Amino acid sequence: MKNLNIAVLPGDGIGPEITAQAVRVLQKLSDQGHFSLTLQEAPVGGAGYRDSGHPLPKATLDLAKSADAILFGSVGDFSLDTLPRELRPEQAILGLRKELGLFANLRPATIYPELAGASTLKPEVVSGMDLMIIRELTGDIYFGKPRGIRTLENGEREGFDTMIYRESEIVRIGHVAFQAAQKRGKRLCSVDKANVLETTQLWREVMTALGKDYPDVELSHMYVDNAAMQLLKNPKQFDVMVTGNMFGDILSDEASMLTGSIGMLPSASLDANNKGLYEPIHGSAPDIAGKDLANPLATILSAGMMLRYTFGMADAANAIDAAVQKVLAQGVATGDIDRPGAKRVGTVGMGDAVVAAL
Ligand code: IPM
Ligand code: MG
C-alpha cells in the first residue's frame, strides 16, 4: 500500500482546529485502506516564532522539504505584527513557497448548489459557477528586489517595491494554466495590466506566444480592473484564469466570496514535480480561534486536492469531495454558511459529519 509522508503545519489562530479535522478525514481514508499515513507535525508562523524565535524554524523547513506533501493551516497573529517584517508570521508561508519552489497556485472557486443563497451576489449570478484561478506564487512584486522604505534627502520617507517577471517564470506558469484548461472547459483568461505596466506587457506577449502550443484552448486577455468587475458581473463566463502573484492574491479572495464563504475554498501550491503545499485560502481568523466556530471544509477540501495532485489518487480525492457535497446536502453548516433550515454545527461537528459521510 502506498505510504503518504505528510508534514502537518497547523500554524496560528484557527489553523490547529481546522487541520485537526482534515487529519481526521485522511485517517479515515487510511482506515478504509486507501493508503497508509506518516504524519509529522511542526510549528510555523507565530507558533514557530514563539517556539524557536523564527516564523519558519529550520526544523520545520527541513520537515517540509523531506515530506511528500504539506498540509498547512494558516498563519497570522496580530500581537506579532510589530515585529520586524522578516519575523512576522506571514513570512513563514512566503518562505515555504519560495524555498520549495511552489510556483503554481491552484485556487478553484466552485459553488455548491446549497450555498448559492449564502453568497452576497444574487443566486442566479453565481449558481453553476466553476472557475479555477491559477496564481503565480514565487515571483512578482511579492519577491522583487529592490524593496524597502528609505529616507530622502529632504527627510521624507519613501516606500518602494519591484514588480518583476522573467520570461521563464511566465512560461512555466503558462504551461500549468493551459494544461489545466485542457482538462476543464478549454478556456483560459490571462489577467494583466498590460495597458500600464511593462511587466505585464511581457506577461501578455509570452502568454500569447505560448497559446500557439495549445490550439485547443481558447485564450483571452483581460485587464485586472475589468477582471475584478467581470467576476462580480458574470463569474460564469470564466473557466480558468491565470495571473501573477499580486493580482491573483486579490482576485482569489474576491472569487471566494462568490461561493458564499471564504471558509469553503481550498488551494494547492505546486512545484515542477507536483510536490505541493495544501492550505485553505482564508487566514488565521484570530477573532474566532479556539471557539469551535471555524469552518474546516476548505482545509478538508485541500487534503482532497493533495490526494489528487501530489499523490494521483483520484478515487480517494473524489471520496472527500463527495463526502463534503453530501454533508452540505444534509444541511450541516458552520456559522459562515448557516442558512434557514440548516443544522448548525461547530468545527469538530463538521469534521464528524464529513468522517461519517465517508
Ligand atoms: C494568501 C495570503 C498570503 C498572500 C499572505 C498570508 C502572505 O493572503 O495566501 O493569499 O498574500 O499570499
Ligand atoms: Mg490572500
Image: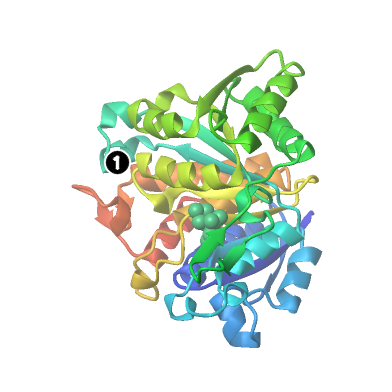
Q: Which quarter of the rendered picture does the N terminus lie within?
A: bottom right
Looking at the image, which residue is at 64% across and 27% down?
Answer: 204
Q: In the picture provided, is 45 more to the left or to the right than 112?
A: right
Residue 273 position, x and y percent, is 80, 46
Q: Position of residue 25 (x, y in %)?
A: 55, 59
* Above or below, 288 relative to 69: below
- Circle 1: residue type: Ser
Answer with left or right where residue 123 lies relative to residue 90. left
Front-most of residues 298 and 205: 205
Q: Is residue 280 visible?
A: no
Say which of 332 and 226 sits in front. Answer: 226
Mark 1, Cα crowd under 10 Å, few <14 / some 14-19 / many 20+, is: some
Residue 316 horizontal/vertical position (percent): 63, 46
Residue located beneath label 1 in the image:
119
Residue at the extreme left of the image, as rendered: 340
Name the one closer to the observer, 184 or 284: 284
